[in-house]
């Protein structure tokens, strides 16, 4: 990470290297494969990989797959794809489940040391016995079983002799500790479930809080970077590493989560949006998932730049979504070809233009990047303009097309509205205009000025296209649910997607999925990789052209 984004974690790493505590930096990105990655995960990805890169270290991609009920190979594959798309390569691909034998041995070690016991209390009873933040917990009646009894029961748990929830293995620490996480936390539970990686080999699985420090130690991770909600777990993390007698001692460091306005990043809520049909999948362009943002058209460069610009601190932060959009515009303004698309078409016939004539006009592919060259735009007697660019009875200071008014067609000529054609219901369906051949764009015409410039598409060669325009999926800036019996689903924006049928220039016909363009006046668009077919292009609007956000 560059100097302007230097952070307290980087300072810790510098000191550790200078002191000789570590010879190299090893980090890891450890998602649980129970859903798709979202923009919050992107901060952890960028942070772990970038910090390791700063010191010529390495980063592992590790799947914390200790809960077979919620995990699936689909999520494993999507996570790998997302990390690669963001531009990162992991040193090692690891799975917590590959360490299950080692974790079991370490649990047995704790039992032999008198630091773990098999408990018969139910989950509700364990919760009741735990106490509160102001009251100490009380010991389980099974806490003082002998080492021999615990070893036998734990082996029987492994052999599948007990039902789910019938017994657990707990660490024996301190039921009166002011930190509830040290009040004999559960470290193994029974789950007769098929695991995506280990099949039916196991029917007991380690709890995440027990497995995670062991995984870090096994892999030689030097700095275990996680979000701030794990801060209270750090004493137990250190307890596990110490009492399981791990050779390597990783250091857990917490940082504040990244939240965006009008965005939910809870996996549970995102899953609910998918399963209840509010969106058309995890990769719906309205979703804050990496796959959804990729499909919408966000670039990995823009996401990385955005993440690096946000502060790395101990406090959770909520950032305006417009800040992310700013970085997308900055990334695309020199990359995206300029073109014209008409989203709500209105037919225009230029009555004094020669019938059957097709003229090819010159335009720069990207005026901000002349090296991209020029393109040809066909022009003829019939064109489409935007319905919004015409008003029969305009207000003052309306400078686009209306009866008797003259405007410039982008890259083409001045046209003047002479006649309106309406259907039986009184709707305007066609305009008849005249053009001035002396006003061709690029000829230096100075005879008169017009205040309005509108875009257009030549009608006889126009390519049909669908345009999808997005607004925030969530109307409220917070994820909090109120106390009136409502849920976050009540904040879902019913107008988060608008679909329009229009046309684009004929040179767009060969566009490929995920090609990106700037449509004059409409914004930046991406060719939808899932909905586009040979017969029809579908464009997702990534961002509009302008924003009030200032970096």
Image (tube, helix red, strand yellow):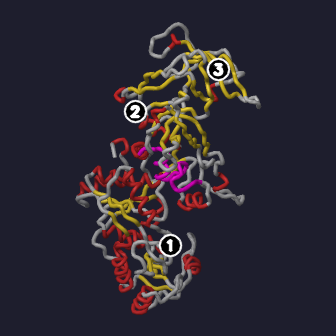
Main SS type for the magenta part?
Answer: loop
x 48%, y 16%: residue: 441
Q: Is residue 327 visible?
A: no
Tell me the SS state at disc 3.
strand
Tell me the SS state at disc 2.
loop
Q: Which residue is mark 2?
A: 334
Q: Which residues are magenta?
A: 279-299
**CB-based contact (under 8 Å), mark 1 and mark 3:** no
Does residue 52 show up magenta in the picture? Answer: no
Lower position in the chain sequence, tag 1 or tag 3: 1
Give neighbour class at mark 2: few <14, some 14-19, many 20+ (Cα, 10 Å): some
Q: CA distance from mark 3 to mark 2?
A: 37 Å
Tell me which corner region of the image, top left, top right, bottom left or bottom right, holds residue 512: top left
**Identity of the residue furthest to the front in this view:** 356
Residue 526: give x, y in percent of width and height: 48, 41
**Identity of the residue furthest to the top in this view:** 447
Tell me the SS state at disc 1.
loop
Q: Which residue is mark 3?
A: 432
Q: Nearer the viewer, residue 247 or 144?
A: 247
Q: Is residue 155 above or below residue 439?
A: below
Q: Nearer the viewer, residue 275 or 35?
A: 275
Q: How many marks?
A: 3
Q: Is residue 141 above or below residue 208?
A: below
Q: Is residue 266 visible?
A: yes
x 68%, y 24%: residue: 391
**Identity of the residue furthest to the right in this view:** 425
* Disc on res. 242: none
Q: Which residue is mark 1?
A: 69
x 25%, y 52%: residue: 56
Tell me which corner region of the image, top left, top right, bottom left or bottom right, holds residue 114: bottom left
Q: CA distance from mark 1 to mark 2?
A: 46 Å
Q: Is residue 432 above or below residue 503?
A: above
């Amino acid at each position: 990470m560059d100097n302007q984004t230097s952070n307290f974690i980087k300072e810790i790493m510098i000191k550790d290297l200078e002191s000789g505590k570590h010879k190299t930096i090893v980090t890891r990105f450890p998602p649980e494969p129970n859903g798709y990655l979202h923009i919050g995960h992107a901060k952890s990805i960028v942070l772990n990989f970038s910090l390791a890169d700063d010191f010529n270290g390495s980063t592992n991609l590790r799947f914390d797959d200790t809960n077979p009920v919620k995990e699936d190979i689909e999520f494993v594959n999507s996570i790998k794809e997302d990390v690669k798309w963001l531009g990162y390569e992991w040193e090692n691909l690891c799975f917590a489940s590959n360490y299950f034998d080692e974790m079991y041995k370490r649990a047995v070690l704790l039992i032999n040391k008198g630091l773990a016991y098999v408990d018969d209390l139910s989950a509700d009873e364990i919760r009741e016995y735990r106490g509160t933040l102001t009251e100490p917990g009380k010991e389980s009646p099974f806490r003082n079983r002998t080492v021999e009894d615990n070893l036998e029961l734990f082996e029987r748990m492994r052999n599948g002799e007990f039902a789910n929830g019938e017994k657990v293995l707990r660490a024996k620490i301190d039921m009166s500790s002011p930190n509830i996480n040290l009040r004999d936390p559960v470290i193994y539970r029974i789950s007769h479930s098929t695991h995506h990686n280990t099949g039916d080999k196991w029917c007991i699985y380690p709890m995440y809080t027990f497995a995670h420090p062991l995984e870090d130690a096994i892999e030689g991770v030097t700095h275990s970077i996680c979000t701030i909600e794990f801060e209270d777990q750090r004493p137990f993390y250190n307890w596990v590493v110490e009492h399981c007698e791990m050779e390597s001692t990783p250091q857990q460091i917490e940082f504040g989560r990244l939240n965006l306005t009008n965005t939910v990043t809870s996996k549970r809520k995102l899953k609910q949006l998918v399963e209840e049909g509010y969106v058309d999948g995890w990769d719906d362009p309205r979703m804050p998932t990496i796959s959804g943002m990729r499909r919408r058209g966000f670039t990995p460069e823009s996401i990385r730049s955005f993440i690096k610009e946000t502060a790395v601190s101990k406090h959770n932060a909520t950032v305006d979504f417009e800040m992310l959009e700013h970085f997308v515009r900055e990334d695309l303004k020199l990359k995206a070809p300029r073109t014209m698309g008409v989203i709500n078409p209105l037919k225009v016939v230029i009555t004094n233009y020669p019938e059957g004539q097709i003229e090819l006009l010159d335009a720069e592919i990207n005026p901000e990047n002349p090296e991209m060259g020029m393109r040809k735009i066909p022009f003829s007697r019939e064109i489409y303009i935007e319905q919004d660019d015409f008003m029969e009875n305009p207000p003052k200071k309306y400078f686009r097309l209306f009866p008797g008014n003259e405007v410039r067609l982008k890259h083409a000529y001045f046209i003047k509205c002479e006649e309106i054609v309406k259907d039986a219901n009184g709707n305007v369906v066609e305009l008849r205009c005249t053009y001035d051949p002396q006003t061709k764009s690029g000829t230096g015409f100075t005879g008169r000025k017009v205040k309005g410039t509108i875009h257009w598409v030549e009608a006889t060669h126009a390519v049909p296209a669908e345009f999808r325009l997005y607004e925030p999926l969530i109307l409220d800036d917070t994820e909090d649910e109120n106390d009136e019996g409502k849920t976050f689903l009540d904040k879902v924006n019913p107008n988060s997607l608008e679909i329009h049928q229009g046309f684009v220039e004929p040179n767009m016909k060969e566009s490929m999925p995920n090609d990106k363009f700037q449509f004059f006046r409409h914004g930046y668009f991406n060719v939808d990789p899932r909905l586009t077919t040979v017969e029809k292009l579908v464009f997702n609007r990534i961002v509009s052209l302008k924003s009030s956000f200032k970096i």
